């Protein structure tokens, strides 16, 4: 199976947000430029190594994330141009933050084949933005959405709920404001406090800063209702899109397709055959033995050190089932039947039953009108009946419980 998705990580930000534990560094402006130059030269060299090895021939989706890729300005444009010289992706996303995106940059990205910008908006309430350490304001965020759209690109907005000081009223105002700006795609994430971040330390001293899970659940519900009424369908736990504007790159992650990672902290996932073909690109990673899937994370700027993990066929099947639970459509019967080749059908059916008992999932027939009587997990897993296991409202809100059930099959 050819690798069809490429992720590139740009680990630089103008200022570290208070909740952030991603790999991103901030520098004084004079040092930033030199650091970006050095880092991008290493990205270009690594990209050429991938290209020459034939690893990019079949790439269909590219996602440049961070960090703040837009901070790299013309270097980002050059990176996109070089990627396009090796492949012809149908979807090419760059992440951007409102303060470092200009109309010129958006126009230059279009010219080199970028199709989509994912903007870190988070909220349209300036007090909330300050509380989480973001350096843009609401006006700048709305201007950035308009800039991206005017350049002819698809735009996605990331929003967060459970922010310090956020209320039901301010959350609704943010959603209304974003909907009025009419992006093509919206992602909604509950804030989590990650140990070691400034916000985590602040919340240790002031409980009121801790996100309230009930409030976050009600924010997710309101988002689903308002976005749904405006024509955005929820296709994944956090993702809403107008028809035809779903993120194909992220869907590749959630459907168990292989992907390549480029840049420090970038993760890749390869099946055995692809790993064997490309093993020379990952120095220090030992032979996979009879592993079925290999997960790799680049650990340094120069791509000389990697963390790696090998998955057996059974672990890979459990991972695919777990990831499928992120999608609104859930686990298709084909995937269940494939999983049943490596996981005993009794165990697999028991986990499906448990998900039903807990009210986290439900069977949805895939073939209309051919099934009589109640659907049973044993029948679906054995392939006697075609049905998908779709998350319920509770399964959507309480996804981690559902994910764990299937991951425990590993
Ligand atoms: S912009 Fe994103 S990556 Fe950068 S510090 Fe903020 S949350 Fe982290």
Image (spheres, rainbow, N blue to C red):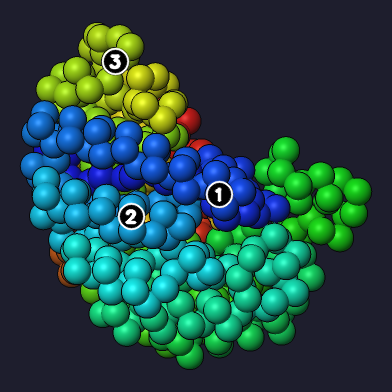
**Foreground residue, 188 or 38?**
38
Work out whether mark 3 precedes mark 2 in sequence or the reverse, and give the earlier one: 2
Q: Which residue is mark 2?
A: 76
Q: Identify the residue at image location x=58%, y=83%.
A: 139
Q: In front of the other: label 3 or label 2?
A: 2
Give the answer, above or below, for where 2 lies relative to 289: below
Residue 202, labelled with which disc?
none
Q: In front of the other: label 3 or label 1?
A: 1
Q: Which residue is mark 3?
A: 283
Q: Is residue 117 visible?
A: yes
Query: Secondary structure under badge 2?
Result: helix
Label pair 2/1, CB-CB below 8 angstroms: no
Q: CA distance from mark 2 to mark 1?
A: 18 Å
Looking at the rendering, in which quadrant would you find the C terminus? Answer: top left
Q: Which residue is mark 1?
A: 30
Q: Position of residue 351 (x, y in %)?
A: 44, 38
């Amino acid at each position: 199976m050819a690798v069809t998705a490429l992720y590139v990580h740009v680990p630089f930000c103008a200022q570290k947000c208070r909740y952030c534990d991603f790999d991103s560094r901030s520098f004084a402006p004079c040092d930033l430029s030199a650091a970006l130059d050095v880092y991008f030269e290493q990205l270009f060299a690594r990209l050429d190594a991938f290209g020459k090895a034939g690893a990019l021939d079949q790439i269909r989706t590219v996602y440049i994330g961070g960090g703040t890729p837009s901070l790299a300005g013309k270097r980002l444009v050059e990176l996109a141009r070089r990627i396009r010289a090796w492949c012809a992706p149908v979807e090419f996303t760059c992440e951007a933050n409102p303060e470092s995106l200009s109309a010129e940059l958006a126009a230059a990205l279009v010219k080199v084949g970028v199709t989509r910008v994912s903007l870190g908006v988070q909220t349209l309430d300036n007090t909330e933005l300050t509380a989480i350490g973001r350096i843009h304001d609401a006006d700048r965020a709305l201007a950035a959405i308009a800039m991206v759209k005017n350049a002819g690109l698809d735009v996605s907005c990331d929003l967060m709920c459970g922010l310090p000081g956020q209320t039901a009223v301010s959350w609704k105002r943010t959603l209304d404001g974003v909907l009025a700006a009419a992006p093509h795609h919206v992602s909604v994430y509950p804030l989590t406090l990650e140990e070691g971040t400034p916000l985590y330390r602040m919340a240790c001293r002031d409980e009121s800063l801790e996100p309230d899970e009930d409030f976050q659940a009600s924010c997710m519900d309101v988002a689903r209702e308002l976005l749904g009424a405006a024509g955005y369908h929820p296709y994944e736990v956090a993702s809403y899109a107008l028809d035809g504007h779903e993120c194909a790159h992220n869907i590749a992650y959630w459907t168990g397709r292989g992907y390549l990672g480029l840049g420090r902290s970038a993760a890749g996932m390869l099946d055995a055959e692809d790993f064997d073909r490309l093993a020379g690109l990952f120095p220090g990673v030992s032979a996979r033995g009879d592993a079925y899937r290999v997960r790799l994370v680049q650990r340094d700027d120069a791509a000389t050190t990697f963390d790696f993990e090998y998955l057996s066929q059974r672990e890979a099947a459990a991972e695919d089932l777990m990831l499928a639970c992120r999608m609104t459509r859930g686990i298709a019967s084909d995937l269940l039947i494939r999983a049943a080749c490596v996981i005993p059908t009794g165990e697999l059916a028991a986990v499906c039953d448990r998900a039903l008992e807990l009210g986290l999932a439900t069977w949805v027939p895939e073939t209309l009108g051919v099934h009589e009587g109640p659907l049973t997990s044993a029948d679906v897993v054995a392939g006697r009946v075609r049905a998908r296991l779709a998350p319920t409202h509770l399964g959507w809100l309480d996804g981690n419980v559902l994910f764990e059930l299937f991951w425990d099959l590993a």
